[in-house]
Image (cartoon, rainbow, N blue to C red):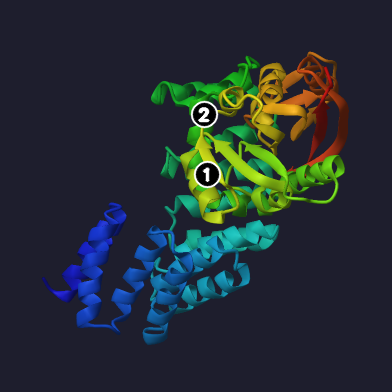
Amino acid sequence: MTHAAALAQAAALIKAQKLDAAGELLDRVLEAAPADPDALHCQGLLRHAQGRSNESIALIGRSLTLQPAHSGAWNNLGNLLVETGRIDDAMLAYGNSVSFAKGGDEGADAMSNIASLERRKGHWQAAERVSRQAIELRPEFSEAWYNLSIALMEQGRIHESVIANSRAVLLQPRNLSARSQVIRALELLGEHEQALVMYREWLAEDPGNPVVTHLLAACEGQAPARASDGYVETVFDSYAGSFDASLEKLHYRAPELVAQAVQEMHGAPAASLAVVDAGCGTGLCAPLLRPWAAHLAGCDLSVGMLQRAEQRGGYDVLHKAELTHYLYTQPGRFDLVISADTLCYFGDLHEVLAAAARALRPAGGVAFTVEAMPGGQDDFRLEGSGRYRHAAAHVEACLAAAGFGAVRIEPIVPRREAGQDVQGWLASARLSAH
């Protein structure tokens, strides 16, 4: 096998997730040519697939020292730097990728990635400008059209955003984010009937799709008791890789707010509590809760999210489970149940809070966030976003029915969306003595 053929085969093995075979092949290639920049680049991609991000960055960095004009390697390095939170370094790497592009559409990927980072920083005009540059290089680039649509929406240019997003959908019709975003934009424009038509057409093309089924129910005003397991798994598995970056762009504060509630309930951390993070996602709550926890468990339906949580660390155990079922099967196991921005995927909260009460020891407590709406004790509503809003009176009634007292519910802003603050409730309570 030639050197080039060996590298091509290694890349194919990485793509197919046959990582051991790829590693063996690359070891042989690098034994013969230890300073080959393409082989080092490929081994960096392998280390990333193995979850070894720091080694991956070092290997691709070494390959670029040997071959600094490799536009694609600079773009890959930028992607890795984003994943590890080194945003400014990533921006420089993407800039180098654009600088070393050899014409045609080679720099379009890096430009689109720059646009994503500008979106993350809230630099909507810059994101628009760079997205248009990427589209000029590659007119059929779905991701660039999608970035453009978000930048336009955040500037309040909804009609232009719908047009750009429709283009993204046309180019990549199974892109859940793009297609749902354009329908959401129609809802924001008040084009409710057109949104319904598009959801029904989408469901006819893809019968049984849990995401479309859920969003159509929201648009029709026919809310299920909670988002289905299929909806949660599909959405969050698809977002796992970019979830943390997306939340940072939205000024996401739910984990921090829940941790504040825990401090108010338990005072200074003493590493003495059995705690469960119900709907743990990528594990953003773990470092905040760990000081109070002698044992910290997490559960989530999304395998992709759990993999990220495991990489982040901080949990003693992680379980793939629907959180109501999980809590119900852990009687008297915990001192504290927390849930940050997860119960917004539930409608009526009676069942899930009863399960939380069952999982707690005497005098155990809960702390969680939901999205807010006015109303009475029976009031909750499924929004076009796919999330539910809850009246404070409903939250309080469900906590009382589950046996909680010392209820505290305060208004919060857990994140921003479409340029606006999202209104929410931070709730905490303890089991009442019997």
Residue drawn 84% across the image and 25% down it: 392
User: What residue would you read off at disc 2?
Assistant: 231
Q: Nearer the viewer, residue 20 or 123?
A: 20
* 178 to the left or right of 365: left
Q: Position of residue 212 (x, y in %)?
A: 51, 26
Classify residue 109 by image quadrant. Answer: bottom left
* Residue kind at label 2, given as amino acid type: Tyr
Instruction: Indicate whether 400 appears above or below 98.
Output: above
Regarding mark 2 in the picture, which secondary structure is present there? helix
First in sequence, mark 1 or 2: give its number: 2
* Residue kind at label 1, given as amino acid type: Met
Instruction: Measure the alpha-carbon separation of dots 1 and 2.
Output: 14 Å
Q: Nearer the viewer, residue 25 or 430?
A: 430
Res 48 label? none
Classify residue 404 by image quadrant. Answer: top right
Q: Which of 25 and 112 is in front in this view?
A: 25
Q: Where is residue 9 in the image (x, y as percent from the top left)?
A: 20, 63
Q: How many marks?
A: 2
Q: Position of residue 265 (x, y in %)?
A: 84, 39
Res 305 label? 1
Quarter occupied by the N terminus = bottom left
Instruction: Indicate whether 204 appears above or below 265.
Output: above
Quarter occupied by the C terminus = top right
Residue drawn 44% across the image and 71% down it: 55
Q: Is residue 383 visible?
A: no
The nearer-to-camera label among 1 and 2 is: 1
Determine contact: label 1, label 2, CB under 8 Å. no
Q: Which of 190 and 336 is in front in this view?
A: 336
Q: Can residue 127 be seen in this view?
A: yes
